[in-house]
Image (cartoon, helix red, strand yellow):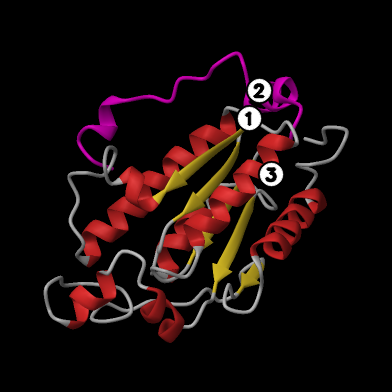
Amino acid sequence: MTRVQSQVTWQDTTVSPEMRAAAAQQVPVCIWFTGLSGSGKSTLANALELELFRRGRRTMLLDGDNVRHGLCRDLGMDDDARHENIRRVAEVAKLMTDAGLIVISAFISPFVRDRQIARELFIAGRFIEVYVETPLEVCVQRDPKQLYAKALRGEIKNFTGIDSSYEPPLAPEMRIDTSRMGLEEAVANLCAALERVGSLGESLAV
């Protein structure tokens, strides 16, 4: 326990996460996309949120680049900074599910340990890890932000897949290879996964 933690006490609130979920009329869940840069995480996350919005679900999309413009703008790209980046995002995602939202998180999140720490914040069944397993060679070929080209030229360091490792998920709830599966099919499969946990059902089961 840190010195600051020793001075704080958990404050119970009258309105519970269950009450907020009931008011939102949905089962809150965190869908966590992980994969290499260029694998299609952000495209999938955005398309999924749009479909959920069309269905009247209450959502929030947390995107890796966007979060680094604000919440995590003080962090670098070394391993310690990556650990802290994912720790912060996971805590925010948990707060948002406590508010009754379906949270869609799209981050490279390269380390198994960090993704496991994120998973452990949620009760069983409320964390859906989606491994966007698009092959590295496809991601390099796409290179939408020209980051692989810069990394290969040595212009940027600690780039996942080039000079920083990516640890594939051990047992993700879903695997999607965007070089083989179209966007419409992928979103349909994701919605089916949400239906299985009750997030898209007619009645709320909390």
Nearer to the camera, 92 or 154? 154
Label whose residue precedes the other's in the sequence (2 or 1): 2
Q: Residue furthest right?
A: 202
Q: Which residue is mark 3?
A: 51
- Gap between marks 2 and 1, in whole Å? 5 Å
Evaluate whether residue 50 shows in this view.
yes
Q: Are marks 2 and 1 in contact (CB under 8 Å)?
A: yes
Magenta highlight on residue 25: yes
Q: Amino acid at mark 3?
A: Glu
Residue 73: horizontal and vertical position, in percent? 21, 44
Evaluate whether residue 121 shows in this view.
no
- Of badges 2 and 3, nearer the viewer stands 3
Q: Amino acid at mark 2?
A: Arg
| Disc on res. 100 | 1
Dot 1 falls on a residue whose secondary structure is: loop
Q: Give the quadrant of the N terminus.
A: top left
Specify the quadrant of the image occupied by residue 55.
top right
Q: At 77% from the left edge and 35% from the top edge, which residue is drawn?
A: 206
Magenta highlight on residue 58: no
- Relative horizontal placement of residue 146, taking residue 9 as reference (left or right): left
Q: At 69% from the left edge and 28% from the top edge, which residue is drawn?
A: 21
Q: Is residue 162 above or below residue 88?
A: below
Label whose residue precedes the other's in the sequence (3 or 1): 3
Q: Amino acid at mark 1?
A: Gly
* Image: magenta residue range: 1-27
Residue 14: horizontal and vertical position, in percent? 60, 13
Q: At 36% from the left edge and 50% from the top edge, which residue is drawn?
A: 87
Q: At 85% from the left edge and 40% from the top edge, which residue is drawn?
A: 201
Q: Which residue is mark 2?
A: 20
